[in-house]
Image (cartoon, grey):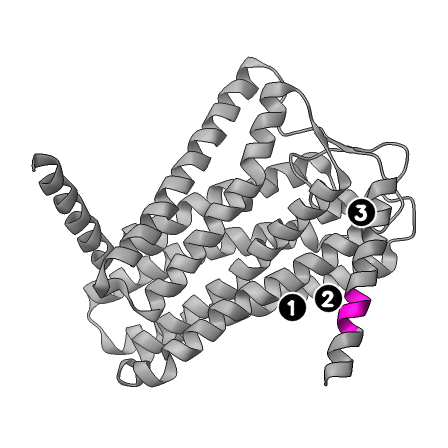
Amino acid sequence: MMKTLSSVSSFAVSLLFEIMNIWNATSNFILLGLFNHTGAHLFLFVMVLTIAFSSLVGNALMILLIHQDARLHTPMYFLLSQLSLMDMMLVSTVVPKMAADYLTGQKSISPAGCGLQIFIFLTLGGGECFLLAAMSYDRYVAVCHPLRYPFLMSWQLCLRMAVGSWFLGAADGLMQAAATLSFPFCNTHEINHFFCEAPTLVHLACADTVVFEYVMYICCVLMLLVPFSLVLISYSLILAAVLEMCSREACKKAFATCSSHLFVVGLLYGAAVFIYMRPKSYRSANHDKIVSVFYTIFTPVLNPIIYGLRNSEVKGALRKCMSQCATLSHD
């Protein structure tokens, strides 16, 4: 066992040194960005910054409420806090660099910085896909098997789901970042995007990338379609159970809740499938940039609203927190 771990670690170190040598030999990339310097684009830039700031505040508030209120110390809200943490990190990975590039005009990014951005982005994006599947399973157990909930959704299983989501996302991010930046690149190092994304970077490679694209396609099936299928199955079973047991008003409420959850989930998975599972010949840089905005900026601001602030328990925790803050301010 020790010999195996030693051989794996030595291989990882040698691979890391090889990748670093390639990065050092590659000149910086240029991110062309999302906006031009026009009045209309300035308005869009301010709007994106406003949405990103709202996302950070909303997700930070969710984490604070879940941490402070003992009634929210349940597996469901723990998974929701992990989702909020991932969304905060996702926005922080993409938006500050994009804003700095737009304001300063210095759009350069080093190969190491590009690789780090790909790794963090895919870690968070892939982890969020699995986390949403775990959250849908939690809702299925709570609705369809409420008496068996403590057994079927124990804290041990919840922690394993959360750690597994982070680990699988990190494994995918490390593999794709290393493989993407191991290719030689053509003379043009201009990336027609507002952040380093693996499919866009592969398009610049001066080498045969067919094998890598096949591997990336398989990874996307595992990271996107499998969790999305689990989400659809879970919500289908929830709706079927609700239709059998509840009144008309309760059914309407269940449909509204499930439809809003599926809308956000569909937005995330649909945009990711569009970016990562299309053939190289069908790619359009402008389309990729617009679609990428949905799961890097818009989805993170919707998650705390759809999953949290529409929930009566979270609203109660927010009112309690605001009353405590008001009491402290009067004192």
Which residue appears at 56% of the width and 54% of the height?
124
Residue at label 1? Answer: 222
Q: Amino acid at mark 1?
A: Leu
User: Residue 207: image x %, image y %?
Assistant: 92, 49
**Magenta segment main secondary structure:** helix
Toward the viewer: 113 or 125?
113
Determine crowd level at label 3: few under 14, some 14-19, many 20+ residues with C-alpha closer than 10 A. many
Q: Amino acid at mark 3?
A: Val
Mark 3 secondary-structure assignment = helix
Q: Which residues are magenta?
A: 8-12
Spatial separation of the CA atoms under disc 1 and disc 2: 6 Å
Please say whether residue 9 is one of the residues in the magenta stretch.
Answer: yes
- Which label number is shown at residue 60? none
Q: Is residue 323 left or right of residue 41?
A: left
Residue at label 3? Answer: 202
Mark 1 secondary-structure assignment = helix
Q: Mark 1 or mark 3, which has the lower sequence index?
A: 3
Quadrant in which the N terminus appears: bottom right
